[in-house]
């Protein structure tokens, strides 16, 4: 251990969601742990995201931001926020890395006594925001490259950025047990919902429900019975083909199911990022957002709906941007069932070649 590692007081990482974004944050956490193996790493996030990091070897602790941190909501919530800010002061000797783009957070940390704050910042104005180590956020490059810039701002050079989630033996065993009903057939998970969080929703990121149903029927013809996953809000998106687990599993149980699946098909939503981070083969369906900027190169396949008006999502816009106001997802409708089936069939053919039945 060198002297820098012995005196390093640790890191306080902030990412407030959504679930898929926190999954991608694990790439930064892994690089940070590799560069500073003896530092204490605490992640500040929202309550719904904490289970993702519960078993992660790169995280020592999680701190939950109060629900009303954005608006303050009411006097009771303001008291919770003030109490939370006081608790932040116990971390002020650590280095803060803010992976969540919000102008108030750096100033709040500076007021809490943090002396080293790495955050995304515009070309000018970083100092008055309380940022001591500014990184440039570029909306037209891969999201993982933006994480790389945060680490570089602190003098760290990542060797590779790959999101990874970690499960314990019991969670993997429970996931395997849930799939036993499929017998010897291939295990395909379908995630037709998602694309929403506490603060905003983009339902036009969803492939049409009817096409997911047609896909399930096509899989059945291939002797593949699918399982449907997602939140309770996604339960009515499933067809009568296969098992409907949407809304019936906890987040960690869903991770176990995804980890033991052979393949997953999903919109640009949390299950897709979870599959990539669990190294489960997957296909992402993209319309308003750009698959090339989101999917890690080693985590799966992507189909992009091509239309003249898209992709229209700009991460620099607020939740009132064009992508949120689009009344009809023409880009998602542009992804045909034939295209999806062709990608899956190609994967099945490659799998058959690499794993012959006689093996």
Image (cartoon, rainbow, N blue to C red):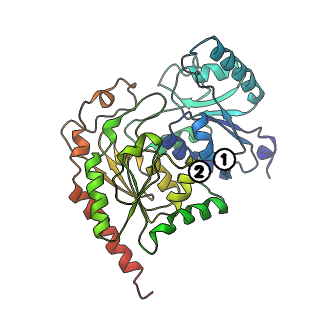
- The residue where tag 1 is placed is 54
Vertical placement of 169 versus 29: above or below?
A: below
Outermost residue to the bottom: 358
Q: Quadrant of residue 202?
A: top left
Disc sitting over residue 36 in the figure: none
Question: What is the count of numbered marks?
Answer: 2
Residue closest to the eye, 308 or 347: 347
134 sits left or right of 267 in the view? right
Mark 1 surroundings within 10 Å by alpha-carbon count, few (fewer than 14), some (14 through 19), many (20 or more):
some
Residue closest to the eye, 78 or 41: 78
Residue closest to the eye, 194 or 70: 194
Residue pictured at 64% horizontal, 14% vertical? 78
- The residue where tag 2 is placed is 252
Look at the image and tell me in which quarter the C terminus lies: bottom left
Picture coordinates of residue 83, whole percent (x, y):
72, 20
Mark 2 or mark 1: whose residue is earlier in sequence = 1
Picture coordinates of residue 21, whole percent (x, y):
50, 41
Q: Secondary structure at mark 2?
A: helix
Number of the front mark, 2 or 1: 2
- Mark 2 in CB contact with mark 1 (< 8 angstroms): yes
Vertical placement of 241 versus 288: above or below?
A: below
Picture coordinates of residue 40, whole percent (x, y):
74, 43
Residue pictured at 26% horizontal, 49% vertical? 210
Picture coordinates of residue 63, whole percent (x, y):
68, 34
Q: Secondary structure at mark 1?
A: loop
Outermost residue to the front: 240
34 sits left or right of 90 in the view? left
Vertical placement of 356 versus 105: above or below?
A: below
Residue pictured at 51% horizontal, 68% vertical? 180
Q: Quadrant of residue 265?
A: bottom left
């Amino acid at each position: 251990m060198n002297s820098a590692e012995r005196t390093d007081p640790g890191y306080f990482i902030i990412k407030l969601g959504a679930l898929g974004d926190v999954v991608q944050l694990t790439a930064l956490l892994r690089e940070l742990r590799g560069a500073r193996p003896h530092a204490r790493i605490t992640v500040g996030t929202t309550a719904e995201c904490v289970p993702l990091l519960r078993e992660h070897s790169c995280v020592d602790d999680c701190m939950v931001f109060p629900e009303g941190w954005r608006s303050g909501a009411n006097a009771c919530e303001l008291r919770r926020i003030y109490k939370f800010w006081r608790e932040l002061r116990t971390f002020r000797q650590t280095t803060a890395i803010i992976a969540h783009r919000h102008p108030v957070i750096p100033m709040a940390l500076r007021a809490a006594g943090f002396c080293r704050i790495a955050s995304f910042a515009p070309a000018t104005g970083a100092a008055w925001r309380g940022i001591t180590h500014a990184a440039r956020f570029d909306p037209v490059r891969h999201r993982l490259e933006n994480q790389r810039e945060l680490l570089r701002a602190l003098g760290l050079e990542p060797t590779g950025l790959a999101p990874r989630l970690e499960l314990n033996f019991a969670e993997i065993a429970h996931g395997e047990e849930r799939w036993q009903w499929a017998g010897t057939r291939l295990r395909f998970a379908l995630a037709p919902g998602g694309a929403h969080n506490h603060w905003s929703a983009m339902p036009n990121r969803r492939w049409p429900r009817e096409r997911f149903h047609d896909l399930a029927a096509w899989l059945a013809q291939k002797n593949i019975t699918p399982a449907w996953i997602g939140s309770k809000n996604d339960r009515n998106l499933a067809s009568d083909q296969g098992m409907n687990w949407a809304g019936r599993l906890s987040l960690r149980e869903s991770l176990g199911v995804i980890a033991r699946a052979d393949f997953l098909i999903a919109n640009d939503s949390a299950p897709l990022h979870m599959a990539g981070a669990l190294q489960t083969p997957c296909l992402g369906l993209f319309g308003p957002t750009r698959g090339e900027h989101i999917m890690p190169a080693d985590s799966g396949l992507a189909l992009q709906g091509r239309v003249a008006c898209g992709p229209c999502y700009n991460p620099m816009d607020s939740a009132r941007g064009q992508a949120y106001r689009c009344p009809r997802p023409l880009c998602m409708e542009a992804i045909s069932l034939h295209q999806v089936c062709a990608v899956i069939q190609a994967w099945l053919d490659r799998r058959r070649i690499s794993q012959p039945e006689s093996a």
